[in-house]
Each structure stands twice: as C-alpha cells, then as structure tokens.
Image (cartoon, rainbow, N blue to C red):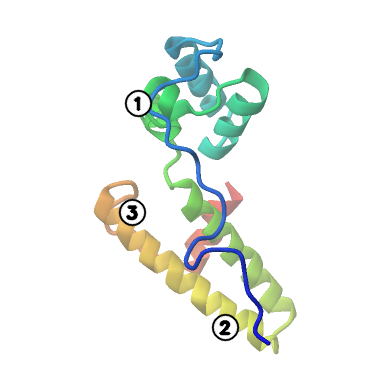
Amino acid sequence: MARVYSRKKGKSGSKKPIVSKAKKWTVLKKAEIEELITKLAKDRKTSAQIGLMLRDSYGVPDVKTAIGKSVSSIMKEAGAYPEFPEDMMSLLRKSVTLRKHLELHKPDKHSKRGLENLEAKIRRLGKYYVRKGDMPKGWKYSPEETKLLVQK
C-alpha cells in the first residue's frame, strides 16, 4: 500500500505572508530604523544579522514593509555594504575550510567532489555578481586569494 503525504506537490517550507504596509504596533519610525541599520552595519554586522536584531530586539517585523527598502540597499546608501555579498563570503569561507580539511585528509573523495561542486557554485555566483555590479569587474575565483580575503 502506498503512503499518502499531506503536503501539496512542489510546495515546501514556509512563506512570508503578503503584506503591503507596516504594522501599526511598530514603535520605531523610518528614520530611526535607518539609523539603527547604519549603526549596526558599521559594527560589521551582516544584513541577515541586522534583520534578526531589528526583529528580536527592536520589534520591527519586516524592514522592507516598514521603510520600503531592503536592509542591504540602506547599507549601500550609507557606504557600509561589504565588498563581497553575504552569500558569496559564506561560500568562500566554506571553500577555505574544505581545502584545509583536504590538506589533512587527502584520500577523502567525497569532500573533494564537494569542493569541486562548491567552487563551481562560487564561479557561477561570481559571474552573476560581476554582471550585476556587486563585485569588481574582472573578478576570478582563486583559492589563494580567497584564503587571504577570508582571513581579513
């Protein structure tokens, strides 16, 4: 007998509800939220960390509905956006740790394959960000440069 699953086909995870305007119970005003974002960005917090802090500590449920702009766009306007996007930096950190692991465990073929896939993803994402203008033109992935970049 076949199992019957209750989840609809193709749907998984949770989705934010569609909301067009800010909640009435939000205490902070637009200018205060922008100030907080720039202050936290200058303390070298990522956009995801800033969003979580605003939600948990300051009671701002969603920055985009409250202000009309995303956290990263506010960071760019303030000049506090990092040189490399957040998701790219996490992939670069992961590649450095995986290379370090492979130096110690040379015969680990599964990790070697994982590194190949990870580096392919980094190259694809790098092309996208260069095209979009979020990363410097002519950027190429290089393990040695990545190691130096991540250590900063």
Q: Residues within 10 Å of mark 2 (few under 14, many from 20)?
A: few
Q: Nearer the viewer, residue 30 or 79?
A: 30
Q: Are marks 3 and 2 in contact (CB under 8 Å)?
A: no
Relative height, residue 152 to residue 68 (above, below): below
**Secondary structure found at label 2:** helix
Query: Is residue 133 among the parts visible in the rendering?
Result: yes
Q: Residues within 10 Å of mark 1 (few under 14, many from 20)?
A: few
Earlier sequence position, callout 2 versus callout 1 = 1
Residue type (three-letter) at the residue carrying disc 1: Glu
Q: Residue at x 39, y 61 (%)?
A: 125
Work out how far the residue at label 3 is from the one at label 2, CA to CA, in angstroms.
24 Å
From this viewpoint, which residue is outermost toward the front?
1
The residue that disc 1 covers is 77
Picture quadrant where residue 140 is located: bottom left
Q: Which mark is residue 59?
A: none
The residue that disc 2 covers is 113
Number of dots carrying numbers: 3
Q: Quadrant of the N terminus?
A: bottom right
Q: Is residue 87 left or right of residue 57?
A: left
Q: Residue at x 50, y 13 (%)?
A: 24
Earlier sequence position, callout 3 versus callout 2 = 2
Q: Nearer the viewer, residue 96 or 21?
A: 21
Picture quadrant where residue 127 is located: bottom left
The residue that disc 3 covers is 129
Residue 71 in picture, x, y percent from top left: 45, 31
Q: Residue at x 47, y 66 (%)?
A: 10
